[in-house]
Amino acid sequence: MKMTFRWYGSKSDPIPLKYVKQIPGMTGLMGLLDKPAGVDWPEDEFKALVDEVHDAGLELEVIESVNVHEDIKLGLPSRDAYIANYISTIKMLARNGVKVIIYNFMPVFDWLRTDLARVIPEDGSNSLYFDEKDLGEMGPLEIVRRTAESSQGFTLPGWEPERLALLEKTLKQYEGMTGDGLRANYKYFLDAVIPVCEEVGVRMACHPDDPAWPIFGLPRIAHTVEQYDKIIKLHDSPANTVCLCTGSLGSNPDNDVPAAIRHFGEMDRIGAMHVRNVKFLGHHHFREAAHLSSTGDLDMYAIMKAIHDTCPDTYVRPDHGRMIWDEKGRPGYGLYDRALGAAYLNGLWEAIERG
Ligand code: DNO
């Protein structure tokens, strides 16, 4: 296992890289460049990021959120130009040492919550929260407005202003799109990019829908094991993999997360792992918990054991943390609780290895 940390770059992340390096066992980052979907990432900017990360004594082998342009997901004629940019970015990242690219194929929205700072009554910390009932009352435009307002001035992954400016138009374009239609467009994308990944030695890792069910009537096709099996078959290759996010898949109690890890781990189809815990509060209603098993509903030992047994060399990062100790930061991406999460996951790992 390689323990890593999501980091947004020194211009936008208040956490100094030196602090990340000081978390015990931290080997590198899941990094990103803050670029709108569809853009060919500039090599000079990326090289500067690589140098900065290496100077801090960390690796940069995983990149997140190379976002897929909506025109690709919608299957519009303009998709070919965006796919060409995507391919150029893949080649550039590979030239600069990247091994895994995490992306998603969710229409319009990336992850979604109805409250970014819900107080946890037991200890006064706060965390990301979702209640479908609140969503019903809000509607897509309202949820976007609220999320932007409560993001503490930080851009959130998947909630980039350029994308949201077009929201109304994009929602209209999806009218009538079915799961099969979206999958066909996904295949077109994978058929173009996966051969390039094979050639340059990069793996694409698809992040699950979060939460793990359709929202606002939009089709979503990556939130169960069966759906991921289909995705893998769309273009069967060791470079077509899953970013298995325990908290996203685990938001639906019907998903057996350790079994899912074992299923894809045994097939060598896990490119990266996001590891966090979830507390169920009712139907389509949950909040994010501390990483410790007993504070939520996922069995974190079983999750780490499944990684250990089936994909021990994969990249892992502690996922969203709570906001604790009065830290001010990007919701879900503070330093303190993610550092505690990494330490806990490393502790489980050591016990599994030695036991
Ligand atoms: C949320 C993140 C996701 C993930 C993207 C990958 O907090 O885990 O935004 O990075 O879905 O494209």
Image: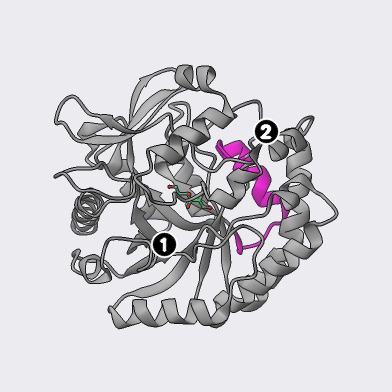
Residue on which the image places disc 1 = 314
- Nearest the eye: 323 or 248: 323
- Is 328 placed left or right of 64 in the picture? left
Q: Is residue 328 above or below residue 39?
A: above
Where does the image place residue 265, in percent across and percent down from the top left?
Answer: 48, 53
Residue occupying the point 46% across, 28% down: 252
Q: With 190 as the anchor, is 340 left or right in this view?
A: left
Badge 2 element: loop
In the drawing, what numbered circle is on residue 294?
A: none
Q: Position of residue 211 (x, y in %)?
A: 49, 33
Q: Which residue is mark 2?
A: 219
Q: Amino acid at mark 1?
A: Thr
Residue drawn where x is 43% and y is 29% of the image: 114
Label 2 environment density (alpha carbons within 10 Å; few <14, some 14–19, many ≥20):
many
At x 36% / y 79%, what residue is drawn? 52
Residues 264 and 214: in front is 214
Based on the displayed image, in which of its 4 quarters is residue 317 positioned? Answer: bottom left
Q: Which residues are magenta?
A: 222-240
156 is higher (above) or lower (below) than 40: above
Residue 233 part of the magenta-drawn span: yes
Instruction: Note whether 5 is above or below 341 in the view shown.
Output: below
- Residue 256 visible in rendering: no
* Cα gap from disc 1 to disc 2, whole angstroms: 30 Å
Where is residue 219? Give x, y as percent: 67, 33
